[in-house]
Amino acid sequence: MALLLHILITMVAVWITTALPGITLEGADTPAKILTLLAVSVIFGIVNVVLKPIAKTVGCLLYLLTFGLFGLVVNALLFWLTSYLAGELRLPFHVNGFWAAFWGALIVTIVSAALAGIVRRARTPVEER
């Protein structure tokens, strides 16, 4: 259940990024767009689970030197890679360039964190708050 909720939160976050210039979601109708967002969210999750720990390990020194800001670059590259993989799977989701990926990844991170916090708070019993 937690995995499905995480995918849905990522779907909403990715959908919000499509309002940015350089990030497009094409589709004939709403159900097609929803399925594309679902697939892109799953791809993004897999890319993050597999590659992000490797990038953190390899770029450890850069993380330290930039006080963690290099993580923004890593997130942008992973978001851009997700777009590439979506294109290879013939999904109509495209990120055009590094800066679109940078801002898109930043939005996904912020929106995902906010939505996850709201959901976590809603699921916490009132007595524990």
Image: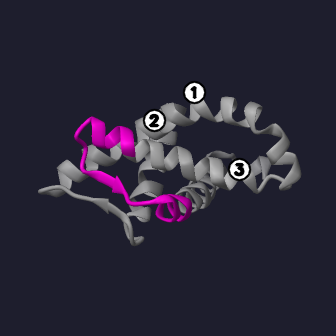
For disc 1, the marked residue is 50
The spot of residue 107 in percent (x, y) is: 55, 63
Q: Residue furthest left?
A: 28
The spot of residue 33 in percent (x, y) is: 24, 52
Tell me: residue 61, above or below residue 68: above
The spot of residue 32 in percent (x, y) is: 18, 49
- Give whichever of discs 3 and 1 has the lower sequence position: 1
For disc 3, the marked residue is 71
- Give whichever of discs 2 and 3 has the lower sequence position: 2
Neighbours of disc 3 within 10 Å: few (<14), some (14-19), many (20+): some
- On the rendered structure, is 54 left or right of 12? right
Query: In this orientation, does residue 39 appear?
Result: no
Query: Hey, what amino acid is under mark 3?
Result: Gly
At horizontal 56% and vertical 60% (from top left) the residue drawn is: 102
Label number found at residue 27: none
Circle 1 — which element? Answer: helix
Q: Compute the Cα span from label 1 to label 2.
A: 18 Å
At horizontal 28% and vertical 46% (from top left) the residue drawn is: 36
Query: Hey, what amino acid is under mark 1?
Result: Val
At horizontal 55% and vertical 48% (from top left) the residue drawn is: 77
At horizontal 54% and vertical 33% (from top left) the residue drawn is: 2
Circle 3 — which element? Answer: helix
- On the rendered structure, is 69 left or right of 65? left
Q: Which residues are magenta?
A: 84-104
Label number found at residue 4: 2
Do the residues under discs 3 and 1 have CB atoms within 8 angstroms?
Answer: no
Q: Nearer the viewer, residue 57 or 50?
A: 57
Q: Quadrant of residue 87?
A: top left
